[in-house]
Image (cartoon, helix red, strand yellow):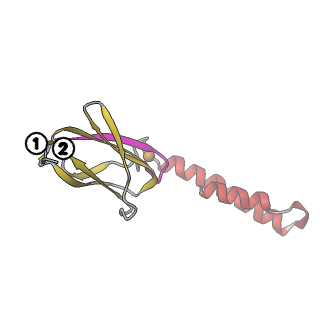
Amino acid sequence: MMLRVLANLAAAIPVATLPAATLLAATLLVAAVLVVVIQVAVIPGPAAAHAILMDSDPAARSVLPPGPVTLRLRFNSRIDHQRSRVALRVADAEQVLPIDRGSPADTLFASATLTPGIYVIRWQVLALDGHITRGDVLVTVAGTAPKP
Ligand SMILES: [Cu+2]
C-alpha cells in the first residue's frame, strides 16, 4: 500500500517541471524500492500477521444449554469485519450469521438461538495483511429444546 502511494506520487509528477521534480521523483522511486526491500527482508514467513483465533465464547468443545447465545471470536490482530464470515453448521445445514456491527477491531460478535445438537461455528476472517484464515469451533448444545 505504501509502495503504491509512493509509486503514484512519483508517476504523478510531470516531467516538464524539471529539474527539482526529477530529483523528487528519483528520491521517491528509491524510497519505494527501499520499502519493498525492507518488506521482503522483514517478513519472516507466510504465517506472519495472519489472524489467529485467540479465544472464543462459547469455548471450543464446551457444552451449553439451549437458547439464545452471543458468539464471540477474538483474534490476535485486527480483522476486516466486512470481509469476514461466521456460519453455524448443524446436521449438514449451514446458516451464515450476521456479524454485529459494534464488534471490536479484533473480535467478531454474532447472535444465534441454539437448539440441542452438535454445532460447528465456522469462521473465516480477513486480516489487515490481506490474508484469509478460517477455522472451526465445535460446541455441543445439550438438553431439551424449550416447548414452543
Ligand atoms: Cu498474513
The residue lying at 75 percent from left, 59 percent from top is: 10
In the image, which residues are magenta?
126-138
Picture disc at residue 142 = 1
Q: Nearer the viewer, residue 125 or 17?
A: 125
Q: Is residue 145 above or below residue 12?
A: above
Instruction: Name the spot of residue 82 as percent of width and height, x first.
Output: 47, 54
Q: Vertical placement of 81 versus 92: above or below?
A: below
Amino acid type, callout 2: Thr
Quadrant position of residue 44: top left
Q: Are marks 1 and 2 in contact (CB under 8 Å)?
A: no
Q: Where does the image place residue 104, in percent across and percent down from the top left?
A: 36, 63
Quadrant where the N terminus lies? bottom right
Residue 115 shows which numbered tag?
A: 2
- Is 137 in the magenta? yes
Look at the numbered disc 2 and give the secondary structure of its residue.
loop
Label 2 beta carbon less than 8 Å to ligand 1: no
Quarter-of-image position of residue 101? bottom left
